[in-house]
Amino acid sequence: MFEITQRLLLAFLSGYFLCLSGSLSQLTTHNPLSSPSTLGFTGVGVLSILGGFFIQKYFLINTSLELIGTVIFLILLLAIFLIVKMNPKTFKHLKNFILLGIAFNLFVGAIFSIVNFIFISRGIQFPSSIWFGNFRFTSIESLVLFMILFFLSILFVRGQARKLELMNLGDLFARNLGVKTSRVTMMSLGVSLILTSVVVIHFGVFSFVGLVLPNIVRSMKFFKYSIRRELYFGPIICGIILLGLDLLCYQVTIYGAEFPVGMLSAVFGSFALITVLFRSGNMNS
């Protein structure tokens, strides 16, 4: 009973993190098509897992892949911080940030495919399932980490929601009211990067979730004209959605095998986004 409760709680928290990451990405870039994937954040998580796998296999370290991946992620996070600091002009324009993110994600995806092929050809077990997120393997350590990040996320949202709301009315307007827009943007994108990468490192990639769920939430009347509501309550609804999908995967197996919830969420999410776009009339604008 504890194991299934732990699993569902982690599924909820993962949905919460991915939705919040997507909302922060879209609000700070003023682009509804922005997401942790298009900004390259998913690729950072995948690269951390790849590095952890190599270290675990070739140095025979008897430590969990998640822990090694987290250490590598922290190193990558420091490297990203230094790169942004040394190249402020390149990252000043968010359009460049998005283009670099897309290119990085494509690069990591290509590297993953090549490494996957090489390892399979050599008969070495490779964690190819990382592309299809699932919650079949959970631990109390993951739950503790996710709960800490959950409370820190709530504190961050409470502190920055008003500023993000003002920025949505225009960066110049927000700056005139004393909001340091560049700082808020970098902090929000940093939180999005951390939350996304932690989910990827522990449970794999959940394609389109960070893109689709915030757009679905934003289409609801309760959230449509309130950024604070989107940031406060939107991730909760998204967490419940991912929890429900995972519970469905847990209870309904196909020929004895559990269907990865990451596949299911991508199918339902993309279909829901198409429906929302048609209903809102955005396809004709």
Image (cartoon, helix red, strand yellow):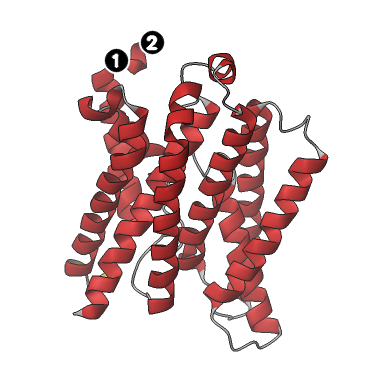
The residue tagged 1 is 281
63 up-or-down from 87: above or below: below
Q: In the image, what residue occupies the spot 60% across and 28% down?
A: 181
Amino acid residing under circle 2: Ser
Residue 156 placement (x, y as % from top left): 46, 46
Q: Identify the amino acid type marked 1.
A: Gly
Q: For residue 115, say whether it is visible.
A: no
Q: Find numbered disc 1 in the image and state the secondary structure of the residue it sits on.
A: loop
Depth order, front residue of 209/129:
209
Query: Residue 161 vs residue 86: left or right?
Result: left
Q: Left of 71 or right of it: where is 143?
A: left
Q: Which residue is mark 2?
A: 285
Residue 148, can we see it? yes
**SS category of the residue bearing label 2:** loop
Q: Residue furthest top?
A: 285
User: CB atoms at circles 2 and 1 under 8 Å apart?
Assistant: yes
Callout 1 crowding tier (Cα within 10 Å): few <14, some 14–19, many ≥20: few
Q: Total of numbered circles in the picture?
A: 2
